[in-house]
Image: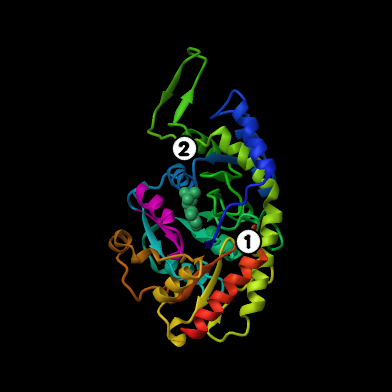
Amino acid sequence: MINYGKQNILRPDINSVIKALKSNFLTQGPYVDIFQDKIKKYFGAKYCTVVSNGTAGLYIAGKALNWKKGDYIITTPITFVASANSIILSGAKPILVDIENEFYNLDPNKVEDKLKKTKKKIKAVVAVDYAGHPCDWEALRYLSSKFGFKLINDNCHAMGAKYKNKKNYAIKFADIVIHSYHPVKNFTTGEGGSLLTNDQKLNKKFLNLRNQSIIKNKKFDPWYYRISESGLNFRLSDLQCALGASQINHLDKFVKKRNEIASYYNLNFKNFDNLKLPLVRKDSYHAFHLYPLLINFKKIGIDKKVFFKKMMRKGINLQVHYIPLHYQPLIKKICNINKGDLPISENFYKKEVSIPIYPSLSLLNLKKAINAIKNTINKK
Ligand SMILES: Cc1ncc(COP(=O)(O)O)c(C=O)c1O
């Protein structure tokens, strides 16, 4: 079965984990700092706190920024449920703003319209570099300064991307950057994630929130610690950090391979009227965590569900990223949004299919996927 995404574990990664396994530390050992330092260096951030997954990162960000009941956070409908869940769990409410048609990211013009019209207290904007394509961060930063909200880059798809030709763009524009190192992402620690910031105070909060909000103070007694707010365990183990510290070395190579696969898809699908291929902004380098192919199922005369089943029978396991957040009963209820309110996202959902893209995808399997797609849409 050819999946839409897959990890790529190389020999040095295995060796790194073995080394950690043979050491004295399984959880908080030297690899935590080694991995954090490597992340800081690659992404140009002053501080990095690794956590158990990307969702934990989003949750901690909200806690550290003191989101609470009565606060509102703007985000995109085309994202994983984690973006909304972390907002809701903080007590705040999400406000969904539609995406732009070109790159499928949060539309800064619509964000500005919303900010001008609403009387609600907008504490933050969580924007997602969807599929690996950077948002219009310059516009979002301008709005953040103008309207005084915090800017979070949910960068889980875009590790290895460039904006304005810079791979350290994310923390240049956002106050907090969130990563996920889930196996389908651009590099992996199994489960894992991190928060990046240039703000020392914020990072201190991240570190506390990662570990039960414990504050140690050996001045009193060698064993002494105290808590003054509640926290949970969001630590990432030394084993996972050993994997991450080696995997991050391959990131550029992996993203290059993803771009080569995307170019091959572009070449093969460019003459099909009913397909829309992912675009790349002139100043950006796409990280191609996903290759979102938009298929006009209505024009082709095939149901999306039938297409999926036929592809599955041909050994290709596709995915959809994402069901718009407001189609989820919980979010529909909280946000009071109805079908039809976010037309670009809704139209996108009708057409979007995530087709296989990962560094170890062989040319043979890539061709197999292309032929399966072509044959299925031609024959219906
Ligand atoms: C855009 C986005 N945000 C957040 C997350 C959550 O990351 P994790 O699965 O590591 O909790 C994901 C993961 O799929 C994601 O794609």
Q: Which residue is denoted by mark 1 in the rendering?
A: 361
Residue 252 located left or right of residue 180? right
Nearest the camera: 200 or 102? 102
- Residue name at image x 54 percent, y 73 percent: 293
- In terms of secondary structure, where does tag 2 sit? loop
On whether residue 88 falls in the magenta region, the answer is yes
Q: Is mark 2 within 8 Å of ligand 1?
A: no
* Quadrant hosting residue 265: bottom right
Residue 320 located left or right of residue 159? left
- In terms of secondary structure, where does tag 1 sit? loop
Badge 1 vs badge 2, beta-carbon distance below 8 Å: no
- Res 35 label: none
Q: Mark 1 vs mark 2: which is more N-terminal?
A: 2
Q: Position of residue 208 (x, y in %)?
A: 48, 33
**Visible in this render: residue 44?**
no
Residue type at tag 2: Phe
Q: Position of residue 152 (x, y in %)?
A: 52, 53
**Visible in this render: residue 274?**
yes
- Residue name at image x 43 percent, y 60 percent: 74
On whether residue 120 falls in the magenta region, the answer is no
- Residue name at image x 55 percent, y 48 percent: 181
Spatial CA distance of label 1 from label 2 is: 33 Å
Q: Which residue is denoted by mark 2 in the rendering?
A: 234
Residue ranking furthest to the top: 221
Q: Position of residue 365 (x, y in %)?
A: 61, 66
Q: Magenta region: which residues?
A: 71-89
Residue type at tag 1: Leu
